[in-house]
Image (cartoon, grey):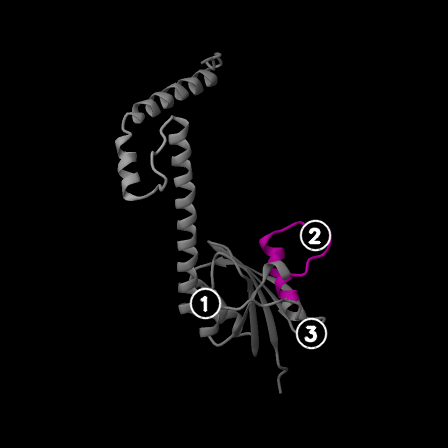
């Protein structure tokens, strides 16, 4: 009867290419770098199939990050275990500051085999969609707040003070539209700044007011 073979695969994910390393089971099991492959679903499906064909059991892992959970769902759909790892909880040796895709993939494979990685909760597609929506809304609200603050500060700087208490109403927006005379002043300042920058680049002293 042939020996039961299992492997632990670490994937350093990126936008274009994923680095892959394989650690075979056992303390003396071989750890090797498989290579960098295209990060597309088609390419990863093919590579996962190649790796899985050599072993009886394969467990994959990669760090949670901006690439999301598509790779996790792909691996699970192919019938394999996959762990999405919390980056901040990955054990690191003191003084080990050199990071390369190859080293990170090998390290993930070793740590997965040793059982030293902490998994994050992976939401289903419904939860992930709601979470993305909430984050997008929070970002939009913060951007709106910052831009409103900038506009208010700009108007105050140019001596334009809204005569009522409550701002950012429809009446306030109409008041902003009525401040058309400030636009030529903005353009004048922009032209003066452009000339000063050009003079600075040419070596002349064009910074006097």
172 vs 197, left or right, is left
Callout 2 crowding tier (Cα within 10 Å): few <14, some 14–19, many ≥20: few
Q: How far apart are marks 2 and 3 (CA)?
A: 25 Å
Name the residue beneath numbered marker 3: 26
Q: Is mark 2 on a helix, strand or loop?
A: loop
Q: Which of marks 1 and 3 is in front?
A: 3
Mark in the foreground, 2 or 3: 2
Please tell me which residue lies in front, 84 or 34: 84
Residue 154 as seen in the image, left or right of residue 109: left
Residue 156, visible in the rendered structure: yes
Estimate the x, y position of residue 97 in percent, counting from the top left.
67, 49
Judge whether 185 appears above or below 152 on screen.
above
| Residue 157 sits above or below residue 64 on the image | above
Quarter of the picture containing the N terminus is bottom right
- Rendered residue at 42%/18% (across/down): 198
The residue that disc 1 covers is 46
Which mark is nearer the camera, 1 or 2? 2
Asked whether the beta carbons under mark 1 and mark 2 sit within 8 Å of each other, the answer is: no
Question: Neighbour class for label 3 at 10 Å: few (<14), some, many (≥20)?
Answer: few
Q: Which residue is drawn at 45% across and 67% down?
A: 46
Point out the stretch of residues depicted in magenta.
90-111
Among the two numbered marks 1 and 2 on one chain, the one whose residue lies closer to the N terminus = 1
Distance between the alpha carbons at the discs numbered 1 and 2: 33 Å
Element under label 1?
helix
The reply to whether discs 1 and 3 touch (Cβ–Cβ < 8 Å) is: no
Instruction: Please indicate whether residue 147 sits to the left or right of residue 59 in the image.
Output: left
Q: Residues within 10 Å of mark 1 (few under 14, many from 20)?
A: few
- Work out whether 156 lies above or below 148: above
């Amino acid at each position: 009867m042939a020996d039961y073979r299992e492997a632990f695969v670490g994937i350093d994910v990126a936008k274009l290419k994923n680095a892959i390393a394989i650690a075979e089971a056992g303390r003396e099991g071989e750890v090797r770098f498989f290579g960098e492959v295209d990060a597309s679903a088609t390419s990863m499906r093919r590579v996962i199939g190649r790796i899985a064909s050599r072993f009886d059991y394969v467990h994959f892992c990669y760090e949670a990050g901006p690439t999301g959970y598509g790779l996790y769902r792909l691996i699970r759909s192919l019938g394999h275990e996959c762990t999405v790892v919390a980056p901040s909880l990955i054990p690191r040796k003191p003084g080990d500051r050199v990071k390369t895709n190859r080293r990170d993939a090998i390290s993930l494979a070793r740590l997965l085999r040793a059982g030293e990685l902490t998994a994050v909760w992976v939401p289903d597609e419904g939860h992930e969609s709601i979470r993305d929506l909430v984050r997008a809304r929070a970002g939009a609200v913060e951007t709106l707040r910052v831009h409103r603050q900038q506009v208010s500060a700009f108007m105050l700087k140019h001596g334009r003070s809204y005569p009522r208490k409550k701002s950012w109403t429809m009446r306030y927006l109409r008041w902003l539209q009525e401040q058309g005379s400030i636009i030529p002043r903005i353009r004048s300042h922009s032209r003066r700044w452009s000339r000063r920058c050009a003079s600075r680049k040419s070596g002349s002293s064009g910074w006097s007011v």
